[in-house]
Amino acid sequence: MRLAIPLYTIGISLLIAVAIFGLVRKGAQRWINIGIVIQPSEIMKIAMPLMLAWYYQRRESALRWYDHIAAFALLAIPVGLIAKQPDLGTAVLVFAAGFFVIYLAGLSFKLILPILLAVTIAAGSLIAFEHKICQPQTQWPLLHDYQKHRICTLLDPTTDPLGKGFHTIQAKNLAWLAVSRCFYCIYV
């Protein structure tokens, strides 16, 4: 618990430093050279749940609704800085790590249910309208082109069978092979 505040503070400071004068590689500004080249967003995967656990531990005797708002503010700062790099995958992981701490600290499921419903509807819409939204001329205003390409390749890996879709196709083939062998073993 003694490391929560220093680790969080160092992580946020390094993320701000990355935003100001970080190294750009492959179109993303995610790294910083402090004698060695590091990616500060990786620190936040550990620092975020530690910080929120420390925060809730200090308030466990008199937890109020505004404590959850303050916790979400503590969570939003690193998630926003990481998403700005852009590193959407790590931002989602840091958010999930922090969100589960907030939920386990007592956030009501009634507050989570509408958000979960909205995410489910959004995911269902992506799947249902994949053939329209994954057209090359369709622009996604909140995501970069490579992020759109990743999502569309996940929805239909055959659009890039030798590139991003290769591993998804191979995993699907291996899953079918494993299932068929199981059925073969059961019936033989």
Image (cartoon, rainbow, N blue to C red):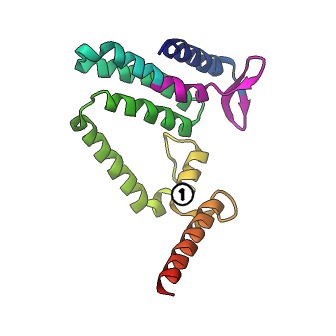
Q: Which residues are magenta?
A: 24-49
**Residue at horizontal 28%, vertical 47%?**
117
Residue 188, x across and y down, in percent: 51, 87
Provide the residue designation for mark 1: 154
| Foreground of the two, 177 or 144 | 177
| Foreground of the two, 110 or 27 | 110
Residue 122 horizontal side relative to residue 131, left or right: left
Is 140 magenta? The answer is no
**Residue at horizontal 31%, vertical 44%?**
116
The amino acid marked with disc number 1 is Leu
Residue 13 horizontal side relative to residue 140, left or right: right
Is 35 magenta? The answer is yes
Q: Height in image: 102 above or below 162?
A: above
Residue 114 horizontal side relative to residue 163, left or right: left
Q: Residues within 10 Å of mark 1 (few under 14, many from 20)?
A: some
**Residue at horizontal 49%, vertical 41%?**
141
The quadrant where residue 62 appears: top left
